[in-house]
Image: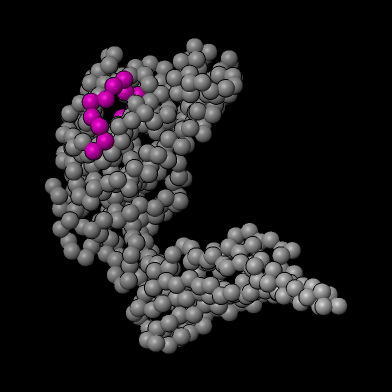
Amino acid sequence: MRYLLIVIIVVVLAVPLSLVLLSNGTTLKIDPPMTAIGGVTPVQVRIENPHGIRRLTAIIEQDGKSYTVADVHETPHRVMFWRSHFGPQIRRFQAGKQQVPSLHDGKARLIVEVVSNDFRGSTDSAEADVQIVTQPPRISTDGAQHYINQGGSELVVLSPSGYVTDSGVRVGKYEFRSFPHPSQPGQRFSLFAYPWDLPADVVPVAFARNPAGAEATARFWYKLFPKKFRARDLPIDDAFLDKVVNQIDPGGSGDLLTRFLKINGEMRRQNNKTIADLRFKTADHFLWSGPFLPLTNAAIESNFADKRSYIYKGKKVDEQVHLGFDLAVTLHVSVPAANDGRVVWADNLGIYGNCVVVDHGYGLQSIYGHLSEFAVKAGDAVKKGQSLGKSGSTGLAGGDHLHFSMQVDGVQVNPIEWWDEHWIKDRILSKVNAQ
């Protein structure tokens, strides 16, 4: 009888002990991070607990007072919790002055607490120091006339006010940053593009916003000159496929055409993203001066934004847009830097082969592809006309030439404008008093 009593006691103690041991704490994170809260600001919390949660509470603390902005209860499972398994979860709620009128501009703290949905019911929390912002951002633009070529560049001066942490120009799905005006305190400017792939009825707008979720926009006077870009057939054969595919993808598997299509599509997109992301390695001042240099005495083999249809054995097998100029002179001709700047890339880059990218400041960068050799390395300061290397046929090139392009804040643009001294003075330098 005594042994039976001992067994019963052990079982009675073991059950709750095992439930406690099976319980989990909760990992939670305010994601994306919060730095400001305005009138109505969305908050997103990432929660990881295999048993889920049974309560979420969010409060804002300011001046020693606490205000509840979210209190969500879910069905508890204290005993049978181990039968459930939850992956990472996202919980969303709104916080701001609309819910708590007592909040005022200034520092505060957001605290999110969750109670785990298990026997222990432990409480875990995530916190963030935030700024309460009730004054909306405002923005106005210059009174200049902006003549924009489709696929080209333009500059607008902005006057943001209020609590603003981000401003620039938005053109359709593309956004372009702004930078402090070099000679007018309190003003900013945005060097932006009207991308080649947007319809002519897209209206560019200036914007100003803050982390509280508030945004203001303003329009400016502009006239767009639509452009008709070329469409052309590009015949490819087995000799071409063998050359470029095995150079770019040595040791790859599958037939040449399938491998080529993957390179021409998937790798092209990856390579263009790599180039676009180099915009984050830009100087916050002008590195260049005067017109950009073209490759002299060069024959133009392809234009900017040519739509290429790839023809293999009489059939169209692919279509891509060529974002640059293909310029040919002679075999292994020296390639000059188009203007002063700093090298932010000098390495192989898939379809571009041996590639150099030079930053000229404020998001403006020049791109040189298919080189046979390098004369510079990443980090080098270069002068206009200085050799960056020699032309070649590396990457997705059928013969020796230079692929030259330029980009504005990650969007490739027609470089013809930047070869034009008059256009540069009129459209760019005159607006930032840098002539």
Residue 227 located left or right of residue 42 = left
Residue at the spot 52% in from the left edge and 80% down from the top edge: 69
Residue 422 in percent (x, y) is at 19, 40
Residue 5 located left or right of residue 107 = right
Q: Nearer the viewer, residue 382 or 117?
A: 117
Residue 153 located left or right of residue 339 = right
| Residue 286 versus residue 76 in the image, above or below | above
Residue at the spot 16% in from the left edge and 41% down from the top edge: 289
Magenta span:
368-379
Kindly indicate the quadrant of the structure image that contains residue 341.
Answer: top left
Q: Nearer the viewer, residue 46 or 203?
A: 46
Say which quadrant the N terminus sits in: bottom right
Q: Nearer the viewer, residue 74 or 216?
A: 74
Residue at the spot 58% in from the left edge and 16% down from the top edge: 314
Kindly indicate the quadrant of the structure image that contains residue 395.
Answer: top left
| Residue 66 versus residue 7 in the image, above or below | below
Task: Decide if residue 299 is in sight here.
Answer: no
